[in-house]
Image (cartoon, rainbow, N blue to C red):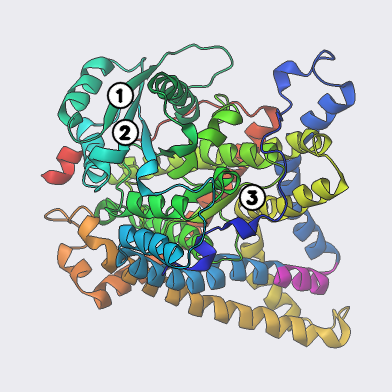
C-alpha cells in the first residue's frame, strides 16, 4: 500500500477556512495611492533588496570576522558548513536512497486495483462514502504542454509517453500550448493534433499571442493563456472543474507509464473537495534523458539537482516545492486567477500564490514515479556548457519568489479572519521561506565560505596564541576537520546513488552515441561508471559551485530592480541528433 505520508487524507485538515482570498502582490508599476498606501509601496520596494542584501551581508560578515577575530570566524564558519553538509549532502544522500526504494515500490503497484480494493473494503464495512468523494472514472486529466521553437520530434517523444497511459483515450486531454510568434507554428500544431487525435479523449492547441499588456513571454504567460482557453472549453462542455486535474509539463517531459494512474489514485484517495483543492502533486524530475552526451560539469549539476529534488519529495518532514512538471486541481488554479504572466518561475510562483490565497493550506505531495527530461544541449561541448549556463541563470531568477512572498505576505495576513489564522499562515510559511533561502542565498555564499574554510582552519591550528575561544578552540577545530571528512564520505555515497539511480531508469535514457567519450561500455558496468563520475564530480565541483554563485548574484542584482525578466530559452537537443 502507498505510504501514509504520500497520501493526504481528510484528517490532515482539522479546521476549514475559506478556500481562496484575493491576495495580490505589490507591483512596481501600480504602487500609486489609488492602489496601495505609500508605506506599503516602500515596503514592497524594500523587499526587492532582500535577496542581494542577504547575500552581501553574509559574505561581508565572514570576511569581516576573518579580519577581526579568526577563531570566532572559524566557529561561525563551521556552523555554516555543517548546515550545508546536512542540507546538501547528508539529507540528500539519505533520502535519495529512500526515494529510490520508494520509486521501485511505486512501480510495482496496480493503482486501479488499489482503488477498487479501497472501495470494496469500505462497502464490506458498510461505511457511507463521503459526499464529495470521487471515484476512478470521475477524474479527467488535461496535460498542458507549453513550448516555443521546440523540435517537433522532442514534442513527439513527450506526447508518446502520455499516449501510452491506460487512461489516455478515456480520461486524458492534450493541450498544446503554442506561441503565436513562432514561425509556422500553426502547421506544426496541426500536424501533431492530426497525429494524436485518436490517442487521447481530447486534443487541442492554443496560440499565445505576443504583446499582451503586463505580460512577459515565457512558460508562465503561455500556461496562463492555455489554461484560460481550456476553462472556456470545460464550461462549454459542461464539465465539473472539481473533477479536472491540470498537469503542467515541459516540452521534453518523459512521463512514467503509471504516472496518471498513480495521480488518479492519489486524487481519489482524498475524500473531501477542500483538501483536494489545496494539494499539488509533484513527481521527481530527473535531468538524465541525454545523460551520456552531457559534459562532466552538466552531469554533476544533473546529479545534485535530481537527487536534491528526490530527497525532498521522499522525506515526509521536508518542504517540497513544485518543480517543472506538476499536477494541480483545475478549481484551485482558476480560483486564484491562474498563472501570473509577469513572473518567470511559474512553478514556485503558482504554489506561493495558492499558498497565500488559501491562508497557508496549500501543500505539495509526491507521486514517486519519475519524469525524465533533457538538459540543454548544443552541437559542441562548449555550446552545451553555454546552453546550461543560460538555463542556470534563468533558474536562479527564482530568487524573485522570495520578494513575491515577502511583499504579498502583509496583504495575506490582513485577509486572515483571526489571530489563529495568522499564526497558522506564518507558521506554515517559515519552512517555505527557509527552503528558498537555503537554495538561493546559500548558493550565493557557498563559494566564498568554502574557499575560506581550509585556510582559516589552518591559521587557527598553527596560531594557538589567538586563544579567544579558550578551551573551546580545540572543539571547533576538530569539529571543522571531522565535518570535512564526513562530507567527503557523503560525496562518495552521493556518487554511488547516482549510479543506482541511473541503473533504475537507463531504459528511458537516450543510448550513448558511437565514438563518445567515455565509450558506451563505461555505463554498462557500475564500477567504471562510478569511477568515471567520481573523477568528473571531484574535478568539476568547484566549477559548479562557482557557476551557481555567479548565477545567483546576477539574479539577485536583477531582482533588486524588478521581478520582470526576459525568458531566455536554452537550446535543447534535437531528437534526430540522438537517433543518429
Q: Which mark is residue 218?
A: none
Residue 70 painted magenta: yes
Rounded to the nearest whole Å, what is the CA distance between mark 2 and mark 1?
8 Å
Residue 291 % position (x, y): 28, 55
Residue 157 % position (x, y): 22, 41
Secondary structure beneath dot 2 equals strand
Relative to 243, say whether 495 is above or below: below
Asked if residue 305 lies left or right of residue 509, the reply is right
Q: Which mark is residue 173?
A: 2
Residue 523 % position (x, y): 22, 67
Foreground mark, 1 or 3, reads: 1
Q: Which mark is residue 204?
A: 1
Secondary structure beneath dot 1 equals strand
Rounded to the nearest whole Å, what is the CA distance between mark 1 and mark 3?
36 Å
Name which of mark 2 and mark 1 comes first in the sequence.
Answer: 2
Residue 395 % position (x, y): 51, 42
Foreground mark, 2 or 3, reads: 2
Of residues 221 and 497, the one drawn nearer to the viewer in this rendering = 221
Tell me whether circle 1 and circle 3 mark residues in contact (CB < 8 Å): no
Q: Which residue is mark 3?
A: 436
The magenta span reads 69-79
Residue 464 seen by the camera: no
In terms of image quadrants, where is residue 277? top right
Secondary structure beneath dot 3 equals helix
Name which of mark 2 and mark 3 comes first in the sequence.
Answer: 2
Residue at 69% in and 76% down:
457
Rounded to the nearest whole Å, what is the CA distance between mark 2 and mark 3?
33 Å
Amino acid at each position: 500500500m502507498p505510504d501514509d505520508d504520500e497520501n493526504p487524507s481528510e484528517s490532515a485538515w482539522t479546521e476549514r477556512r475559506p478556500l481562496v482570498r484575493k491576495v495580490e502582490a505589490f507591483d512596481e508599476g501600480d504602487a500609486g495611492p489609488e492602489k496601495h498606501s505609500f508605506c506599503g509601496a516602500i515596503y514592497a520596494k524594500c523587499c526587492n533588496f532582500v535577496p542581494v542584501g542577504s547575500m552581501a551581508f553574509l559574505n561581508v560578515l565572514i570576511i569581516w570576522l576573518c579580519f577581526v577575530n579568526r577563531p570566532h570566524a572559524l566557529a561561525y564558519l563551521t556552523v555554516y558548513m555543517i548546515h550545508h553538509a546536512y542540507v546538501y549532502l547528508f539529507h540528500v544522500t539519505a533520502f535519495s536512497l529512500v526515494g529510490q526504494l520508494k520509486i521501485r515500490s511505486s512501480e510495482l503497484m496496480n493503482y486501479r486495483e488499489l482503488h477498487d480494493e479501497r472501495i470494496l473494503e469500505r462497502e464490506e464495512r458498510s461505511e457511507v462514502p463521503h459526499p464529495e468523494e470521487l471515484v476512478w472514472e470521475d477524474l479527467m486529466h488535461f496535460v498542458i504542454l507549453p513550448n516555443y521553437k521546440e523540435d517537433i520530434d522532442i514534442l513527439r517523444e513527450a506526447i508518446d509517453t502520455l499516449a501510452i497511459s491506460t487512461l489516455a483515450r478515456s480520461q486524458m486531454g492534450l493541450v498544446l500550448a503554442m506561441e503565436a510568434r513562432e514561425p509556422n507554428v500553426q502547421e506544426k500544431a496541426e500536424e501533431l493534433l492530426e497525429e494524436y487525435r485518436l490517442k487521447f479523449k481530447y486534443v487541442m492547441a492554443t496560440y499565445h499571442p505576443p504583446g499582451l499588456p503586463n505580460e512577459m513571454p515565457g512558460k508562465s504567460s503561455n500556461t496562463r493563456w492555455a489554461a484560460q482557453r481550456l476553462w472556456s472549453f470545460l464550461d462549454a462542455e459542461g464539465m465539473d472543474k472539481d473533477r479536472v486535474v491540470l498537469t503542467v509539463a515541459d516540452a521534453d517531459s518523459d512521463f512514467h507509464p503509471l504516472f496518471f494512474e498513480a495521480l488518479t489514485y492519489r486524487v481519489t484517495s482524498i475524500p473531501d473537495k477542500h483538501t483536494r483543492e489545496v494539494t499539488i502533486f509533484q513527481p521527481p524530475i530527473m535531468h538524465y534523458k541525454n545523460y551520456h552526451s552531457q559534459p562532466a560539469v552538466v552531469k554533476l549539476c544533473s546529479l545534485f539537482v535530481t537527487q536534491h529534488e528526490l530527497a525532498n519529495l521522499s522525506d515526509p518532514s521536508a518542504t517540497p516545492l513544485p518543480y517543472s512538471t506538476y499536477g494541480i486541481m483545475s478549481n484551485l488554479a482558476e480560483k486564484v486567477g491562474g498563472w501570473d504572466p509577469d513572473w518567470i518561475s511559474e512553478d514556485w510562483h503558482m504554489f506561493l500564490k495558492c499558498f497565500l490565497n488559501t491562508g497557508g493550506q496549500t501543500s505539495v505531495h509526491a507521486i514517486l514515479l519519475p519524469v525524465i527530461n533533457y538538459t540543454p544541449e548544443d552541437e559542441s561541448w562548449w555550446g552545451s556548457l553555454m546552453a546550461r549556463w543560460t538555463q542556470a541563470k534563468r533558474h536562479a531568477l527564482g530568487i524573485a519568489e522570495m520578494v513575491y512572498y515577502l511583499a504579498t505576505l502583509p496583504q495575506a495576513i490582513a485577509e486572515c479572519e483571526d489571530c489563529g489564522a495568522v499564526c497558522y499562515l506564518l507558521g506554515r510559511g517559515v519552512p517555505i521561506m527557509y527552503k528558498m533561502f537555503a537554495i538561493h542565498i546559500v548558493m550565493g555564499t557557498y563559494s566564498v565560505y568554502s574557499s575560506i574554510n581550509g585556510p582559516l582552519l589552518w591559521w587557527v591550528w598553527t596560531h594557538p596564541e589567538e586563544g579567544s575561544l579558550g578551551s573551546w578552540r580545540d572543539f571547533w577545530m576538530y569539529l571543522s576537520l571531522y565535518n570535512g571528512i564526513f562530507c567527503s564520505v557523503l560525496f562518495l555515497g552521493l556518487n554511488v546513488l547516482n549510479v543506482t539511480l541511473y541503473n533504475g531508469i537507463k531504459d528511458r535514457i537516450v543510448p550513448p552515441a558511437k565514438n563518445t567519450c567515455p565509450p558506451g561500455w563505461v555505463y554498462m558496468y557500475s564500477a567504471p561508471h562510478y569511477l568515471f563520475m567520481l573523477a568528473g564530480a571531484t574535478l568539476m565541483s568547484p566549477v559548479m559551485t562557482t557557476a551557481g554563485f555567479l548565477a545567483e548574484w546576477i539574479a539577485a542584482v536583477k531582482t533588486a530592480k524588478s521581478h520582470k525578466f526576459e525568458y531566455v530559452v536554452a537550446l535543447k537537443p534535437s531528437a534526430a541528433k540522438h537517433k543518429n
